[in-house]
Structures are given as C-alpha cells and as structure tokens.
Amino acid sequence: MRRDEEFSEFFTSRFDWARRTAYALCGDWSEAEELAQNAFVKAYAKWPSIRRETAEGYVRTIVTRGFLDTRRRGRGREHPVAELPELGVGGGFSDPDAKLNAALQQVGPKQRAALVLRFVHDLSIEQTAAELGCSVGNVKSQTARGLAALREAYGEPVNSERDR
Amino acid sequence: MNIEDELRGALHIAAPPPTTTLEAVVKRGRRRVFAQRAGAALGVVAVVAGIGFSAATLNHAAPPPQQADEPNHGPATVEHSLGWPRVVTPAQQPYGTWTPGSSAPPVPGRPVVDVPMCNMRMATQEVVLSTEPFTADFTARLLERVPRELSDKKIGNAPGNSVLQAVEFDITDAGGTGSLRVTGGRFTGTPQAYADDALWETGDCEPPRRLVLSNGTIVQLHAVRPFEPFQSLVQRLSVFRNDGLLVQLELRNFGSPDLAPDPKQQGQWRRTGAGRPTLPLSEEEFSRLGLVVAATT
C-alpha cells in the first residue's frame, strides 16, 4: 500500500527528530516519546492530505501544541511503572546537555516553545507564530522573556546574539 | 558562550533509543482512521435520520397540498378532504376571479374569497327541476333521513319554501344557519351520459369529483361557487340515479334567518342577511348525505 510505504519512510527518517524536539520542550524522554508517537499517529490518519514537504512542520506543530495542551490543562504527568528502571533514560545533570535541558525547564511552557521553535528549529517569527497559533508580537515577547528566563536559569554569564 | 547557539544544538544530544515502532504507530493510526470514518458515517446517518424525521413531522403538520389552479376558498369554504376522484377531462380556463358586486358586498370583516371563475355550460338535455318527480314516500324519507344523518346539527324545515318547488332544510350549528335545497328532475339516457353533459353547469374550473356506484348511479360533487348578494356560497351535489331520476342537492351558507317576505312580490322572498361565513357542512358530510339520498327510494 503506497500510503503505508510513504509513511514508513517518513517515520523512519523523522521520528527521532520529533522525539528530540518533544524532549527539548518537556525535558522527559518518556513524555517526549508519547508526544512524538501521538503526532505520528495523527499524521498517519491525515497522511493522504499531507504534502510530503510540509509533513515535518505538521508533526512539529502537533508535538508543540500537544505539549502546550498538557501544560495548559495543568495535568500532572503520570509515570505508571511496574518497577523502577535500573537506569535513567536521560543524561545526568552533570553533562552540558542535561544542564541546558534543566535550564529550559525553568522557562515557562509557552516561552519554552517559542525558544525551541525559534532557535532549535530556526523558524522565523512568522513561522513560529503560525505553529503556535498566536500573533507575531506575542512570539516576540515570549521569545524575549524566554531568553531572559533561560539565561537566569542557566546560572552562569552567557552572551546573547543581541549583545554582540 | 552564546545561549542561542546552545539552543541550536539542543537536538543533538545523547538520547535513549526510541521505543516506538512503526507497527505500533500504523496500528494506532488505522484505528484512528476507522474511528473517524465511523464517526463521519454515524454523522451522515444522524443527519439523514434527522432530515427524514423533520420532513415526516412537517409533512404531518402541514396542510394538504393544494393544486395551484384550485380555488383558494379561504375560511369561507368547506374542507377538501373528500377522496372521490375528479372526472378525467381537461380543466376549464378561468376568465377571472370572483369579485363581489358593489351593491351587495360581503359584510364588513368577511374576506373576499379567492375563487377562479369559469364559464357555465348548460347541459344540452334540458331537465326541469322541482319536487314533482319525488314520490310522497321519497319526500317523507328525505325529511326523515336528512336530520338523522346530520344528527350533530339542528335541522329544520326552512319556512317560506314550498315542497312543491324544493325540499329545503335549515342547517344550524355553532357557525350559524345555512340551508340545503333538494330538487329533482328526469333525464333520459344513462347516468354517465347525462352526468357528462352536465359537467360544467355550475361553472367549475376543475372537473368535478365523481363517484360511480355499483348499480350505475353517479354522484357528482361540484366546487363551491360564490354568487350575489353578499358573496353567498353554494355547492352542488348531483345524484344521477340509474332509474333516470336526477336528485340535486345545493348547500348554501344562508338559511331562513336571512330571508324575509318580499313586499313587492306576493309569496316571494328576498335576501336580507349575509348568512354564515362558511357552508354548514363539510365536503365529507355533504358527500355522505349525497350517498344517503342516492340510496333513498
């Protein structure tokens, strides 16, 4: 079936990318897996109407909005496990990646989403506004506040592109 | 260190292997597609059912359809619930609609009926109508059966009318008093031939409704027709019996309370009242009465 073949190719090439995006947003690999999986399930259902060149953006939008929805509902994330894992699924706070992730989690969800879309995915302000479903002005303010909060959370002096 | 550069490298970090498989995503995706299609199908079914229910409800609540060329009798006319078929023949072309005369218009507050007017075409066979063809027994049975058939009405012999000219009844209910005039005559030929000959005598536009009984007797019901004065209403039902007797019933919206002796002509009566706004019988009641008369010997 051509639909499944095309989707399989897309899933293989982009699922990990979507999962990492989700992780940048939520800071939890398990939740990131779930957000990414939900996004791909929705993409599969809509696959005949999704153009291949826009599929990435479609999945990214679902991941981002899914993340914001969970935070907007204020629902505490549950981690139902039968047994405690022997190993953690992510790196410890000692490595640089973990430090950035920890700092990102100190930023508000909407600001975090704006930062991830603007800098991690290098989207324009307009593209970010479209994916978040808000105004350009809102993206600008969320980004500025998010950067300030991130610097503060990072805990050591950092430069900004605006400082150069 | 630049914080934006740090962010740009956020995707390129060590990560645990994904646990989600393509099979799991496709399986969930197919379930989602199925659910969407099932929901859409249920929605369509619900809409169709809703439309069907609404149509049935509205059809039930709506008045029965009326042909465009059929007169709109408004509140002044009887019900059109009779199931008798119309005679299969082309309708007459109206020359206009009813317009009351200025000398004796309808009473104030009574709307002018919207009735198309067509030419009266007299039957080629001339039949004189009176009570002469009626036997004494027939008249007696008529006087007995009409009140019995219309037991929910107050039936009285209309004063001032001689049974030599017509047998007349006042018919009174909550809507006022109307009357029934019964006359008879003799025709030659078959009931079918004479009924066809007399098809347009009352100036109908649509062919009259007709019932052919098993013994060959024909009962023919014509449309309500307004006439002067006061926008009076009359409806004719003719019984063409298989023994050559024509019994003609005319239902009118006025009765003896609307008549007074004519001072200018001894023994004559003149109209003084407009009568009731509607005929005193429904079409169903009138046609039922016609069948009783058809069976009276």
Image: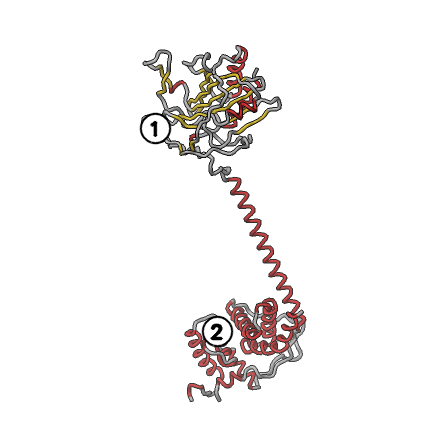
User: Which residue appears farthest toward the top when viewing the image?
Assistant: B136
When the figure is inspected, residue A117 is found, relative to residue B74, above or below; the finding is below
Task: Tell which of A28 and A32 is nearer to you.
Answer: A32
Q: Is residue B264 left or right of residue A64?
A: left
Give coordinates of residue B151: x percent, y percent: 51, 20
Q: Is residue B104 left or right of residue B92?
A: left
Q: Which residue is mark 1?
A: B101
| Mark drawn on residue A110 | 2
Which chain does tag 2 point to?
A
Give coordinates of residue A142: x percent, y percent: 44, 76
Marks 1,2: beta carbons within 8 A:
no
Residue A143 image-quadrant placement: bottom left
The residue lying at 51 percent from left, 29 percent from top is B208
Q: Amino acid at mark 1?
A: Gly
Q: Residues within 10 Å of mark 1 (few under 14, many from 20)?
A: few
Quarter occupied by the C terminus of chain B: top right
Q: Amino acid at mark 2?
A: Lys
| Res B74 seen here | no
